[in-house]
Amino acid sequence: METKLLTNDDNSLIEAAELLKAGKVVGIPTETVYGLGANALDVNAVADIFKAKGRPQDNPLIVHIADIKTLETLAFDVPDLAYKCAEAFWPGPLTMILKKRKIIPDVTSGGLDTVGIRMPSNRYARKIIEYSGLPIAAPSANLSGSPSPTTAMHVFNDMNGRIPAIVDGGMSAVGVESTVIAFDNDSIRILRPGFVSREDLLDICKNVIIDKGVLEQLSPDTVVRSPGMKYKHYSPKADVTIIDADTDKFREFIKEKADRDTVCLVFDENDVKGIDIKNINYGKDSKEQARLLFDALRHIDEIGAKKAYARCPEKSGVGLAVYNRLLRAAGFQVIKL
Ligand code: TXA
Ligand code: MG
């Protein structure tokens, strides 16, 4: 199969929507990361997403909608708190886990009786969904285990020959996947941190819990609320370690370890000043780090490094999402100095 790169003019978006209506899988831009979209209600189309990604069957997909009316056609017993969140953060990078209606096939929900729903804000994503008239299931458009794609080229590198088309919407504005939340009585549980932070959610609800799986390594047989959290993720081939230290201690550590096969993921050049070592700048604040992290992780392998030492992001606000992804890329290896 040849993979066509579509631009983001209206004709291309209509072409993408037509492919989706015909049961095909299309790479689509969103504000978080690129998704591999297909008709969420079509068992065969959704099965093709799993095939293209090489994704474990028990890992459910997020269903993307373009208007709030669609919500109740896919989910029932939607709590008031969910409507409050939708009002505050939709369209945007927030996914809500809700009770699913029968119309959602088991293959889409990974056999669960719930479904994750999100209304993206990216204008190309919204138009594609609107033109198709369908709820669109879309996981991140990377091969299972690889860093999520934040450019059409990342998608092309992973999916060339596996899907018929990719829509190029430029670089993803947020850069990490959506915040995934579930509702327990009157509390919100964060299953995956994202751009909508715990602090943001506290404006809506007094009780916001961070699920254990966000910061701890779970064994593959643990029963978890969000199956995606137990899988190896976002990993470059190189061995990544997070160095939790201030600039001076980081520099001292790197001076000792520096060699030709090693690269540093730094906030700015100052972190490796005077040291002869390759480095990748991944941003000086949490928002920039969110935007650049996945590209930086792909870059580690492109330059052929065998080892990578990354400066540790903030563990609050958007930084928690960056830390959560980096922890997985590092296989939970952290050195605290
Ligand atoms: O930003 C995003 O969310 C991107 C873009 C494309 O929208 N999508 C994305 O999908 O990141 P994916 O499949 O790579 O990650 C979905 C996460 C997984 O960790 C999955 O286990 C969890 O959401 N999830 C989906 N449905 C769920 C459900 N019903 N219950 C619990 N967790 C669910
Ligand atoms: Mg993913």
Image: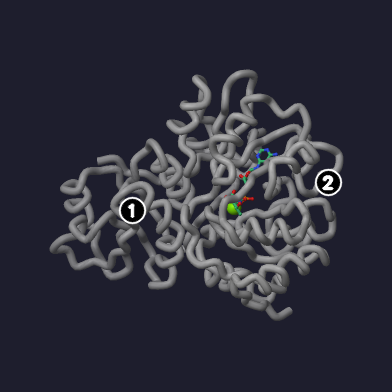
Residue at the location (52% across, 26% down)? 204
Task: Relative to 66, say whether 163 is above or below.
Answer: below
Residue at the location (51% across, 37% down)? 214
* Tag in front: 1 or 2: 2
Residue at the location (83% across, 46% down)? 105
Identify residue for label 2: 105
Q: In the image, is the residue at mark 1 within 8 Å of ligand 2 by its beta carbon?
A: no
Which mark is first along the chain, 2 or 1?
2
Whole-percent x, y for residue 236 in the image: 47, 61
Residue 316, quarter of the rendered image: top left
**Crowdedness near tag 1: few (<14), some (14–19) or many (≥20) residues, C-alpha within 10 Å:** many
Cα separation between marks 1 and 2: 41 Å
Q: Secondary structure at mark 1?
A: strand
Image disc number at residue 271: none
Identify residue for label 1: 310
Kindly identify the amino acid type of the residue bearing the numbered disc 1.
Ala
Tell me the quadrant of the picture where the N terminus can be found: bottom right
Q: Secondary structure at mark 2?
A: loop
Frontmost residue, 48 versus 274? 48
Residue at the location (33% across, 53% down)? 310
Frontmost residue, 71 versus 53? 71
Contact flag, marks 1 and 2 (Cβ < 8 Å)? no
